[in-house]
Amino acid sequence: MTPTDDKLRQMIRLIPPARALRDELEKALGLETYEGVAAAAIRTYRGLQAAVAANSDDPYVATLALETPGGTTDRQKVAEVNLLAAQLVAFLEGQTGLVGFGQGSGDNTVQYGPHIIMQHVDGVHASTIDRMLETAGAERTGKSEQESQKAE
């Protein structure tokens, strides 16, 4: 086995932890649970970046070094590590040719929407809202409104 093969294997092994770091930090930012995780995120990222640098002579890897100025908040630190981790994942995937492999169908995406309370909708009777929801549900399942009413 040539040293190039060894380096390639090492970079392939770094993809899962780099993705996990990126994904977890993205969740922490979205859910605002980043307090207290900045130090661990920084330590983990620096280890990953150093391992990639040891296996690649590409100058781009050096630009991914983490530089957190003093006085930054945990949120700012986590956001910076998240950005750099995403770039590190992209670099690793590009170098290994394994772009998007092993992510699964769910991809752990978190989507946020407005919180709506439908208890008091002024001017709209509850039965009207119920019919609207039934119609929307029938459209999702491919049933017509008439078919939905027959089923009841």
Image: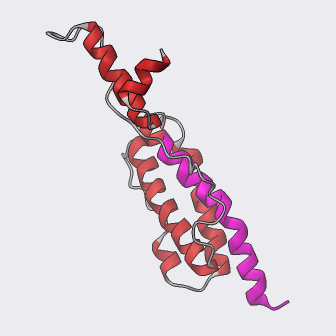
- Which quadrant does the N terminus fall into? bottom right
For residue 86, say whether it is visible: yes
Q: Which residues are magenta?
A: 1-27
- Position of residue 105 relative to residue 58, above or below, is above
Residue 106 as seen in the image, left or right of residue 26: right
Q: Residue furthest bottom?
A: 2
- Position of residue 57 relative to residue 71, above or below, is below
Considering the whole magenta stretch, tell me its main secondary structure.
helix
Question: Magenta includes 13?
Answer: yes
How is colour applied across the structure in the image? secondary structure
Q: Nearer the viewer, residue 102 or 44?
A: 102
What residue do we see at 47% from left, 62% from top? 84
Where, by quadrant of the figure, is residue 7 drawn?
A: bottom right
- Position of residue 4 relative to residue 64, above or below, is below
Q: Position of residue 105 (x, y in %)?
A: 60, 53
Residue 121 as seen in the image, left or right of residue 82: left
Q: Nearer the viewer, residue 87 or 102?
A: 102
Q: Position of residue 48 (x, y in %)?
A: 63, 63
What residue do we see at 62% from left, 58% from top? 103
Q: Residue furthest right?
A: 1
Q: Position of residue 34 (x, y in %)?
A: 48, 38
For residue 117, say whether it is visible: no
What residue do we see at 58% from left, 72% from top? 93
Q: Position of residue 144 (x, y in %)?
A: 38, 32
Residue 70 as seen in the image, left or right of residue 13: left
